[in-house]
Image: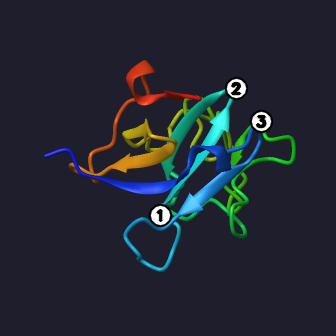
Amino acid sequence: MNRSVALCPLDQLKEGRALGFDPFRSGNDTVFALLHRGEVRVYRNSCPHLDVRLEYRKNRFLSADGQRVICYAHGAQFMPDSGECVFGPCLGQSLTAFKFRCEEGLLLLCIDPFDQPIEVSRDAIGHI
């Protein structure tokens, strides 16, 4: 079975911004999505350094210029296209990317199985 959860309409994703989502109603945004150079990425909202949430307030995952994902707890910086840490205490580690689909104008998080991280590849990247 190919189950998925709708996160948002694709047109809500804007360059230089990221949006957090709580697809399983846990009370916290457990995943976030971003649009970087026309390509969608979906990551787990957790820093590999100490498994803490990345944003300092709702939807504040990126640097002011929108070019890096920032862990506001410890200052780690991640590349938005690969999730790789390029500065900070988890240098060389990466954010966990999730499988998703872009279908009928919606961003859908694939949840079969949700806990299986993926390597970021061209198959995991949605183009708008």
Q: Nearer the viewer, residue 63 or 88?
A: 63
95 horizontally vs 26: left or right: right
Q: Position of residue 13 (x, y in %)?
A: 66, 46
Q: Which residue is mark 2?
A: 37
| Circle 3: residue type | Gln
**From the viewer's perspective, is the residue at label 2 or at label 1 nearer?**
2
Which three-letter amino acid code belongs to the residue tagged 2?
Arg
The amino acid pointed to by label 1 is Thr
**What secondary structure is marked by label 1?**
loop
Does any portion of residue 65 appear in the rendered image? yes
Residue 81: horizontal and vertical position, in percent? 60, 29
Residue 83 percent across, percent down from the top left:
55, 36
The residue that disc 3 covers is 67
Kindly report the distance in space between the C-alpha atoms of the residues bearing marks 3 and 1: 21 Å
State the separation of the CA atoms marked 2 and 1.
Answer: 23 Å
* Residue 128, image quadrant: top right
Does residue 93 appear left or right of residue 61 in this picture? left
| 3 or 1: tag closer to the N-terminus | 1
State the residue position of label 1: 30
Which of the two labelled residues, at mark 3 and mark 2, occupies the earlier sequence position?
2
Q: Residues within 10 Å of mark 2 (few under 14, many from 20)?
A: some
Q: Of tags 3 and 2, which is closer to the observer?
A: 2
